[in-house]
Amino acid sequence: MNISIHNDQVRIKNLENFNPEHIFECGQAFRWERQEDGSYTVVAFNRVINVSLDKEDVVIKNTSLEDFENVWIDYFDLKADYKSMQETFNEDPIMQEAIEYGKGIRILKQDPFETTISFIISANNRIPQIKKSIELIARTYGDSIGFYEGKEYFSFPSPQALAQVDVSELREICRVGFRDQRIIDVSKMVACGDLDLNILKERDREDIKNVLITLPGIGPKIADCITLFAYNKKDSFPVDVWIKRVMEFLYFKEDVNKNKLAMLSREKFGPFAGLAQQYLFYYGRENSIGVEK
DNA sequence: GTCCAGGCTTTCC
DNA sequence: GGAAAGCCTGGA
């Protein structure tokens, strides 16, 4: 990687397979805002950054070389070789089209606690509503992390902070509906030390999933999302209504139950099935593939 | 053990 | 009214 730093911005020269729009809008993250100039302002790990493309370069503003090396290389999965991962799908013409459509998607490595709570909120919910609830949670229970371009930003609250919140207050202020108790319960488990989400990083996909699935509000789909988007287990294949429709329409040509579909897809796509899932999800959702009219 | 229907909040169409 | 990145419960 060819890095240069100027004032508070880091420039990565000639970085292939990095498209901020596709990375953030493919559904793996919720705390981003698209700006008028097409850049993305993002809150993660108690920091605010702005990410954009400048021709072949990636530009990260409002950061430092130290943060880039200690936080953002990991967050953006910059050590992974996306080109060679994509090449494992070379025999698959459907995947070629999905990859072309979503060129520059990367699987983020997000904070496990924030990702867990965010995906509990995602159950039977819409993306704009999920984003809104998470923003309200940060604004109400997180800490101010300063201003960027005249706007104040807030961190996602710690487990300790969320564990103390009153259930009905959380529901009323943050519009989380029936997910209120689940959010508080998981926060309490983490806050009191019964559940260590960070130590799970050392384990494999199936081990992590088996722990997550025991938590309130987390079933197989959400557990798969967390193993993929927080723990970067690229063999994870979350099956939601969208990917189910897409896979049945493009590949299986028949109704397959979700559990079986996850298993068959992991066999089909191999160790980087999660990456395939993201390309297909984005491609399928943006083009309404498999949706009956 | 597996599978499935119904209920759950809130918001938007 | 119906549906939305599902989960939970109870019953077959």
Image (cartoon, coloured by chain):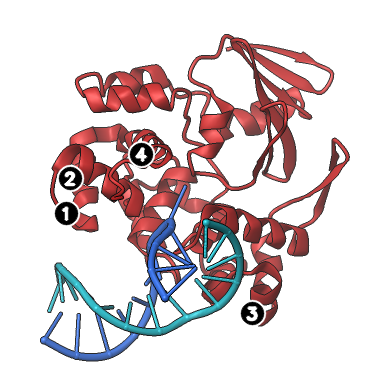
Chain colours: A red, B cyan, C blue
Residue that protrudes farthest toward the right in the picture: A150
Contact check, label 2 and label 1, Cβ < 8 Å: yes
Q: Earlier in the sequence, mark 2 or mark 1?
A: 1
Q: Amino acid at mark 2?
A: Leu
Looking at the image, residue A93 sits to the left or right of residue A99; the answer is left
CA–CA distance between discs 4 and 2?
18 Å
Position in image of residue C5 (x %, y %): 43, 56
Q: Return the chain for callout 2.
A: A
CA distance separating discs 3 and 2: 39 Å
Marks 4/3: CA–CA distance = 36 Å
Question: Vertical placement of A178 versus A246: above or below?
Answer: below
Give how far apart the Cα atoms at labels 4 and 1 are.
17 Å
Helix, strand or loop status at disc 2: helix
Q: Nearer the viewer, mark 4 or mark 2?
A: 4
Which chain letter matches label 3? A
User: Does the CB distance between marks 4 and 2 fall below 8 Å?
Assistant: no
Q: Are marks 2 and 1 on the same chain?
A: yes
**A42 w.r.t. A93: above or below:** below
Q: Which mark is residue A264?
A: 2
Q: Quadrant of residue A51?
A: top right
Q: Is residue A240 visible?
A: no
Of labels 1 and 3, earlier in sequence is 3
- The residue sitting at 68% across, 76% down in the picture is A172
- Could you say which is closer to the camera, residue A237 or residue A211? A237
Badge 1, how many Cα within 10 Å: few under 14, some, many 20+? some
Q: Give the residue number, with chain letter if any, for mark 1.
A: A256
**The residue under label 3 is which amino acid type?**
Val
Q: Nearer the viewer, mark 2 or mark 1?
A: 1
- Residue at 45 percent of width and 69 percent of height: A217
Can you identify the residue that label 4 sits on?
A284
